[in-house]
Image: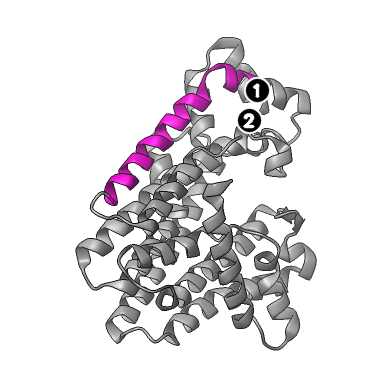
Amino acid sequence: MKKTKPIEKNAKTVNRYLKTKLKGNPKILYDAAGHLIINGGKRLRPYMVIKSCQILGGKTSKAMQAASAVEMVHNFTLVHDDIMDNDEMRHGVPTVHKKFGMPVAILAGDVLFSKAFQIISDSKLSGNAMTQIISRLATACVKVCEGQIMDIKMAEGKKIPSQSEYIKMIGKKTAALFDVSCAMGAICATNKTTDVANLSSFGNNLGIAFQITDDLIGVMGDPKVTKKPVGNDLREGKKSLPILMAIKSAKGKNKTMILKAFGNQKASKSDVKKAVNVIRALGIEENVRSQALKYAERAEKSLSKYSGVAKNELVELLDFVVKRSL
């Protein structure tokens, strides 16, 4: 797919840089820290850092430390997410805690988090730019933790959250890192606050569109593509947008069928399949896609004053994120 080629090229560059930074002793700690990084990932967040720098005339080399730092933070969240969810596989390989054990996995996550800030501190950016980047990344990390606990509490509670509560949660849990990726890239290129705000807005809206689409895939995605069982999020009781919409709009027998599978780890494959078919028949995919598109349009509007290759590549990324197939 043509649109993914710049992403793949960028991922290779970032991967090479990350490997040079994830070396040290004891070797097992760095092997664990780099485990998910060497086994997959599109590097969307580093891509956004670099393209946000380029759109404002900055050089890739100026943004590489920030790009690598945000990927380390992202992987830190994945390691800890997998521990919290007790997931056994990611990117088609065993999760860090399954391969290396719980204590090593926790420390691997901690090392990734610490290394992210170490890398930025070692960069050749001006003092002001470095301070801004460190401050913004730290704030984003706090938001991710807040969003994660909101997600956990939503899952635990019996109440079905409103759409605005869901958007607030993903705005922190997912969009915060997309937002800060674009803001950091902009800061690497300029000290103009309006440009930083525009790119920050792009990242935030892209992040929300990304998570809405991801949640749709989590409910109705093809297991061959997602590497997860069909209706995985439904069985786990995740209160994502497609599930919220389905429960709200379903009536009678249809609603009973959805609720039979929702949050029921013992639900049979047949029960889950029936629930997913009901959700499809309700036209939920179309409704969810239109919500994602709304945020995608806001994101694109944030870039209206810019032009050039980097701008086109960011818009193509937006298009790719929202139109991902199930």
Q: Give the residue at x 65% y 71%.
A: 106
Colour scheme in the image? one colour
Secondary structure of residue under mark 2: loop
Q: Is residue 154 above or below residue 268?
A: below
Label 1: few (<14), some (14–19) or many (≥20) C-alpha neighbours in 10 Å: many
Q: Give 266 or 89, whichever is nearer the viewer.
A: 89
Which quadrant would the C terminus be assigned to in this image?
top right
Q: Amino acid at mark 2?
A: Phe
Residue marked by disc 2: 262
Label 2 Cα neighbours within 10 Å, binned few <14 / some 14-19 / many ≥20: many
Between label 2 and label 1, give the one nearer the viewer: 1
Say whether marks 2 and 1 touch (CB < 8 Å).
yes
Residue, disc 1? 275
Type of the residue with mark 1:
Ala
Q: Residue at x 41, y 60 (%)?
A: 143
Q: Main secondary structure of the magenta part?
A: helix
Q: Quadrant of the N terminus?
A: top right
Question: Up-down: is 289 above or below 297?
Answer: above
Residue range highlighted in magenta: 275-303
Q: Is residue 45 magenta?
A: no
How many labels sit on residues? 2
Determine if residue 169 is in view. Answer: no
